[in-house]
Image (spheres, rainbow, N blue to C red):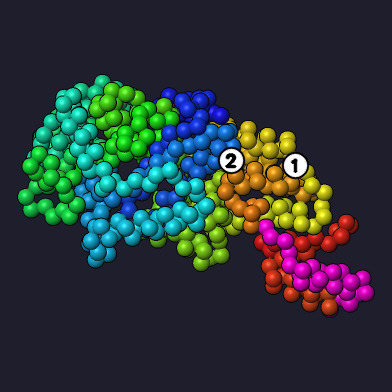
Amino acid sequence: MKLYNTSSRKIEEFIPANPNEVKIYTCGPTVYSFAHIGNFTAYTYWDLLIRTLRLNGFREKRVLNITDVGHLTSDADDGDDKMEKGAKRDGKTVWEVAQMYMDDFMENFRKLGLIEPYAVCRATDYIEADIKIVEALDKAGFLYDTTDGLYFDTSKFPKYAEFARLDLENLRAGARVEFSDEKRNPSDFAVWKWIRDGEDHAMKWEFRGRMGYPGWHLECSTIIHEKLGEPIDIHCGGIDHIPIHHTNEIAQTEGAFGVQMSRFWLHNNFITVEGQKISKSLGNVYYLSDLSERGFSPADYKMWLYQGHYQAERDFSFEQLAAAHARLMNYRNFAALRWQGVEKSDFATEKAEMLECLNSNLNSAGAFAVLDGAVKSGLAPSDDFLKFIDDAFGLSVGDSTPDISDDLKEKIAARTDAKAEKDYAKADALRDEIADAGFELLDGASGVKWQYKN
């Protein structure tokens, strides 16, 4: 199995330290608003990673964090707190907002058929552990105090620029963070924020006799240390996390514990909608519920994503979603052949080729191309092959294919008799009844076959 490692900028063979416990961490959502389809891109792709690991006989121990505190509207250290912003907008407390949007996120997570992690960890449950890391960093000489908070001095961490290939010499002050006279370097970042006079902040904890809260980047270092231990095998996230969030995580973890944080780093690209960045101001924010209202399922969206690659930018449109739906229906009709007396095949060659594609940096599009060939063979899939498809993609291709009812079978037979008797009016009427039940008929030399309506 080979994966693109952001750290080395190369595709490398993935060999876990322990195949029975592949340690994986996935950067999770900030729960201050409903998650749209773009937000679910990462989690859907990482589900493919988990499934591919399992197909190779590995067993994962995966942790997903929930950011419910300390993430400012800027990915740096300025702006309004997103949780406070959500609370003011919704007329709720920050705690109520966090619970509401976390519940909605997990509900949609399950609707997409994503494998649930070993642990889902809320940042607010790890404040004491955060403070221990802050103390360790301070003891190691990485921190300095300002009126705004405790900051990590990136000049004291020689490897700081390596992961993101940053040009610190030419980094313009204020390009990444709001520069101030108290900050020693423009790339320095807060590990703990102080609440200053006049600030209204609902989530706060006492540390060194003052009230404050953790910097956004700290929770990931803390949760990984507490739940998985370093080094982990794979750290996942979006490409936007590379230059700031993940760079800062590495500095914190390696500064505090002196060990490598993660052996592999995987980053997904983003989706646009009809060529534009997803934005409420543009009116192109869609949720899974919006897709449902247009007749599409979460599986259709998952199918659309897997037709591309996790490292490629994808442009979403409802026309493309309709095409993905049609392709998924072809797979389900392929599965339905096994109910109709069609000769079966275990498609051993295709199965091996599909796994080879997935093992080549999660090439799901290539795997689907192989599956398309199996569909065109005219043979029915064995139960074993269908299980492989569902294990690989979680699209319920086989699981969702029930036998057609006895009543519909009788109607199909009656339609065949009516056509033989040239009673076309009756035949058409029966065909319409069958169509209303969600099936369409295909007449061929070997007899009539039924399939699900697209």
Q: Is residue 406 above or below residue 281?
A: below
Which mark, residue 346?
Answer: 1
Q: Can residue 15 be seen in this snapshot?
A: yes
Q: Quadrant of the C terminus?
A: bottom right
- Which sits earlier in the primary sequence, circle 2 or circle 1? 1
Q: Closest to the observer: 369 or 52?
A: 52
Residue 382 in the image: x percent, y percent?
74, 46
Residue found 55% across the figure and 41% down from its top? 51
Residue 286 image-quadrant placement: bottom left
Question: Which residue sits furthest top?
Answer: 158
Is-magenta flag for residue 346?
Answer: no
Q: Which residues are magenta?
A: 401-425
Q: Can residue 170 be seen in this snapshot?
A: no
Provide the residue designation for mark 2: 364
Amino acid, disc 1:
Asp
Q: Closest to the observer: 120 or 283?
A: 120
Q: Closest to the observer: 280 or 103?
A: 103
In the visual, does 115 lie left or right of 176? right
Which SS does the magenta portion mostly show?
A: helix
Residue found 37% across the figure and 27% down from its top? 231
Residue 35 image-quadrant placement: bottom left
Residue 110 in the image: x percent, y percent?
48, 54
